[in-house]
Image: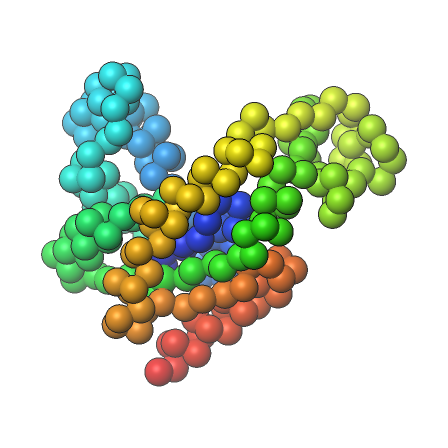
Amino acid sequence: MNLLLLGPPGAGKGTQAQHLMACYDIPQLSTGEMLRAAVAEGSDLGKQAKVIMEAGNLVPDDLMINLISDRIGQDDCANGFILDGFPRTTAQAAALDTMLGERNLSLDKVISITVDEEALVERIIGRFSCADCGAGYHDEFQKPRTEGECDKCGGGNFTRREDDNRETVKSRLKTYHEQTAPILPHYEADGRLIEVDGMAEISVVTDNILMLLEDGRGD
């Protein structure tokens, strides 16, 4: 099954991707990870990407499409894949469709995780983690059992991401609405889009996604 996960930052795409990977035995294809792997391998595409990134520029769409094309040709994508982080614009979505068509492939479903954005901002800015083991916590929803002590390793050092602040989160949401949200009608037009409420419990979101995917298989 070939899937694309869409949703604003903090909607839970990464978490749901992990569950879908296990359910369908397919890898999550993150554009950042693909770029880092290509650069580390020293492939022709990786060398091109390295020069561009070291100059502080964005990797062009055609190079990203070629990276994705190479990646989905690998053995672990035999059962499908989950795209995360690409496409982000309608032009990229069209280019991706073209490339997949040349491989006699297509995206089976596009999963849009919807959120209450005010609640999402509060969810993100409240996040923190253990600096020693990486265990995640939240000021309101997931506090350590003992204040100041990590449940997992017992450490007392906690950290927050610098970009988990109200201004940055709202800026990222604005960018999502301006650039990525316009992709949704592109996939809705041919019935590939499914929408899921991302504000529910993680397990409920997963169950709803799986139900909609299996219903789609029976169409």
The residue shown at (60%, 58%) is 199
Left or right of residue 11, residue 64 in this image: left
On-image quarter of the N terminus: bottom left
Left or right of residue 121, residue 52 in this image: left
Residue 77, percent from left and from top = 32, 52
On-image quarter of the C terminus: bottom left
The image shows residue 77, relative to residue 172, as above or below, that is below
Which residue of the protein is positioned furthest toward the top in this rendering?
55
| Colour logic | rainbow
- Residue 136 sits in which quadrant? top right
The residue shown at (71%, 26%) is 158
Please tell me which residue lies in front, 195 or 131.
Answer: 195
The image shows residue 102, relative to residue 218, as above or below, that is above
Residue 18, percent from left and from top = 51, 51
The residue shown at (31%, 68%) is 188
Please tell me which residue lies in front, 70 or 201.
Answer: 201
- Residue 131 sits in which quadrant? top right
Which residue of the protein is positioned furthest toward the left in this rendering?
102
The residue shown at (74%, 39%) is 139
Residue 202, percent from left and from top = 62, 57
